[in-house]
Amino acid sequence: NAGVTQTPKFQVLKTGQSMTLQCAQDMNHEYMSWYRQDPGMGLRLIHYSVGAGITDQGEVPNGYNVSRSTTEDFPLRLLSAAPSQTSVYFCASSTGSGANVLTFGAGSRLTVL
Amino acid sequence: GQQLNQSPQSMFIQEGEDVSMNCTSSSIFNTWLWYKQDPGEGPVLLIALYKAGELTSNGRLTAQFGITRKDSFLNISASIPSDVGIYFCAGPRGTNAGKSTFGDGTTLTVKP
């Protein structure tokens, strides 16, 4: 089982460029989510989805878009990158039941110059 | 909103020492989860706690769900170098299982 796969692992962007971080899971999990991790600030929820076709905002959604056309995939789009979006991004999935235990990807490190 | 406060922020210990860290909230949580993040990786679940007062062990790790449901602690006994990493507490946000709240993490460094 691959679990949660994120691509790319590293990316450098210039301010104003757009890009998509890809996330795929093969565990048939209904719930998927995107977090960003900044030093000393833990993991902050950007967007999440409770099933195909359903998405909602988390704590820090501004500047990011998501869509969920299939159960397996949950891409995160940066429309116009800003230096404040320099961070490590983690995608996670879960069954959504019980304790909502998350399975995380390995992360994508994004630098915006 | 629900916030989780973890302490300490960082710990520098000698191999073989025991470690204790905790997590508190102003809100009640029905579940507490402890994750560990190795350098360059995503967090991985260590222990899940489901009811107040519960004490659960996983090898050298022991975690407890506070009776008030507003706190939890994680102990690591006889630390080893591979215990290095960031430890997060987390819990589902309210009744929405799609969201999880994370603490800011405790960074553990173990000196051989």
Image (tube, rainbow, N blue to C red):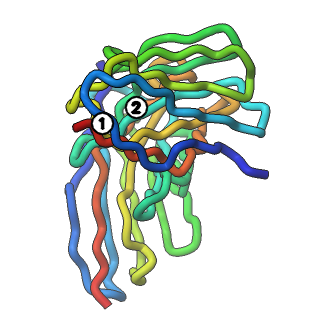
Residue that appears at 32% across and 14% down: A62
Q: Is residue A97 above or below residue A4?
A: above
Disc 1 and disc 2 in contact, CB within 8 angstroms: yes
Residue that appears at 39% across and 17% down: A79
Q: Is residue B101 visible?
A: yes
Residues behind callouts 1 and 2 on a single chain: yes
Residue that appears at 33% across and 87% down: B15
Q: Dot 1: what SS? A: strand
Q: Name which residue type carries label 1.
A: Leu
Residue A47 position in % (x across, y down): 46, 20
Q: Is residue B8 above or below residue B72?
A: below
Q: CA distance from mark 1 to mark 2?
A: 7 Å
Ranked by sequence position, the earlier of labels 1 and 2 is: 1
Which residue matches tag 2?
B101
Residue B73 position in % (x across, y down): 37, 54
Q: Dot 2: what SS? A: strand
Near-viewer residue (B65 or A10):
A10
Q: Is residue B40 above or below residue A10?
A: below
Which residue matches tag 1?
B4
Apparent side of residue A65 relative to residue A67 in the rendered image (left or right): left
Provide the chain ID for the residue under circle 1: B
Q: Name which residue type carries label 2.
A: Thr
Image quadrant holding the C terminus of chain A, namely top left
Near-viewer residue (B91 or A28):
A28
